[in-house]
Image (cartoon, rainbow, N blue to C red):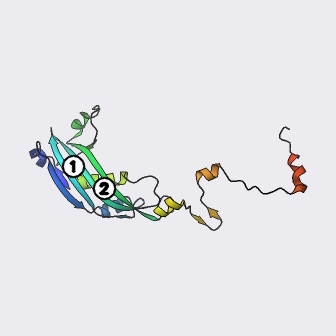
Amino acid sequence: MKWYLSDLKDYKAVPLSEKNHLDLKADLLSRYSDQIIDVQPVDVESHVFYDQGNAIVNAQVKGEITVPSSRSLTPVKLPLDFSINEVYVPDEAALKRFENDESNSGEIGLVADEDGAIDFDKAVADNIILQIPMHILSDKEAKLNIMPEGNDWQVISEDDFNNPKTDDKPVDPRLTKLKDFFDQNQ
């Protein structure tokens, strides 16, 4: 999806509304291959308004991506359903108008090229990355609280580390006198 500010001048009263099916897999995997395993095409419903030389974009994005589990790197399918609200300005001077504006709830984005083009595919891809949570678990890991383990090692939770379980094994009666050998008061 690419729009030019000069073409959007006709959409002051009524927005430019589009529904698109975007395949962003190649772009996302080339830029974020360590964070994304697979990307299904996403559905984007966008509304673009023209206001005083700026383009206001409101979009709803729905789709699905596959990301690695943060615990075991197992592939986890993550559904996407989020909105994007951005204002695109033609140059640096127009951007200064928005710097101290508290009422602006969207993000301000500069138009990248001299032609006044808005490459909204890139904005959608960047916002998909922002939707990935820091802590991702597969269904099995979340339900069973399974931690990875191998030969002579295992991952334990922070709670288990801070509060280790002590084994209450009975002490050999012959060794009970040794417990006072190093008196705590000395």
Q: Which part of the image, by quadrant, shows the C terminus?
A: top right
| Amino acid type of the residue tagged 2 in the rendering | Ala
Q: Residues within 10 Å of mark 1 (few under 14, many from 20)?
A: few
| Amino acid type of the residue tagged 1 in the rendering | Asp
**Residue position marked by numbered label 2 in the rendering:** 125
**Residue position marked by numbered label 1 in the rendering:** 113
Residue 116 can be seen, yes or no: no
Nearer-the-camera pick, 115 or 87: 87
Badge nearest the viewer, 2 or 1 = 2
Residue 137 can be seen, yes or no: yes
Using residue 147 as the reference point, say whether residue 165 is left or right of it.
Answer: right
Residue at coordinates 88% horizontally, 52% vertically from top-left?
176
Q: Are marks 2 and 1 in contact (CB under 8 Å)?
A: no
Nearer-the-camera pick, 184 or 165: 165
Task: Specify the label residue 175 is tagged with.
Answer: none
Vertical position of residue 80 compared to residue 90: above or below: below
For the residues marked 2 and 1, what is the alpha-carbon distance in whole angstroms?
18 Å
Nearer-the-camera pick, 171 or 101: 171
Residue 149, percent from left and from top: 59, 64
Decide which of tag 2 and tag 1 comes sooner along the chain. 1
Q: How many marks?
A: 2
Q: Secondary structure at mark 1?
A: loop
Residue 152, percent from left and from top: 66, 66
Residue 60, percent from left and from top: 26, 52
Q: Residues within 10 Å of mark 2 (few under 14, many from 20)?
A: some
